[in-house]
Image (spheres, grey):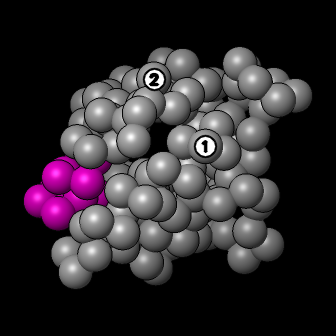
Amino acid sequence: MGTHLFLTEEWRNAVRTVKERHEGGRLDTPGLVVNATITDVPFGDGSLRLHSEHGPVIGWETGHADHADVAFEVDYATARQLVLDESFDVLEQAIGAGALRIEGDRAAFRDWWRARIANPDAVRLDADVRSITS
């Protein structure tokens, strides 16, 4: 499958393919719709607007959802670190340093993240995603 630059369209398509291999596990964490604005992106026009209805790694689609519960803004390097080093400590450090700015219910956002990293099916998926990420 090769590697793909983090957050490019090719990467997001490859992540969908990886997710298909993991069907049947508890991967989706619906219930919280999240908008993300990624700044300092090294491709395109320098920023990326995404949304997810299924968890921090899987399900990112282009554009913002009109019905988002929470939104955040983060620079590309921090977003990459959050995905590749996915842990609650990295999340808290990014929030504390002001690198990840959350609008909306911070507790719900943290719970969304915590549920993701505590899910063994998602941990296996995330390892596969890391293997295709450059």
Report the amino acid beneath label 2.
Ser
Q: Which residue is mark 1?
A: 10
Report the amino acid beneath label 1.
Glu
Q: Residue furthest right?
A: 45
Position above or below: 88 against 55: above
In the displayed structure image, the side of residue 65 where residue 30 appears, left or right: left
Can residue 103 be seen at all in this image of the molecule? no
Q: Which residue is mark 2?
A: 134
Whether residue 120 appears in magenta in the rendering, the answer is yes
Dot label at residue 2: none
Q: Residue furthest front?
A: 1
Can residue 89 be seen at all in this image of the molecule? yes
- Provide residue 13's location: percent of width, then percent of height: 56, 54
Tell me the element at label 2: loop
CA neighbours of label 1 inside 10 A, class few (<14), some (14 to 19), many (20+): few
Q: Which residues are magenta?
A: 116-126
The image quarter in which residue 39 lies: top right
- Provide residue 67's location: percent of width, then percent of height: 72, 76
Query: 24 and 1: which one is in front?
Result: 1
Whether residue 105 appears in magenta in the rendering, the answer is no
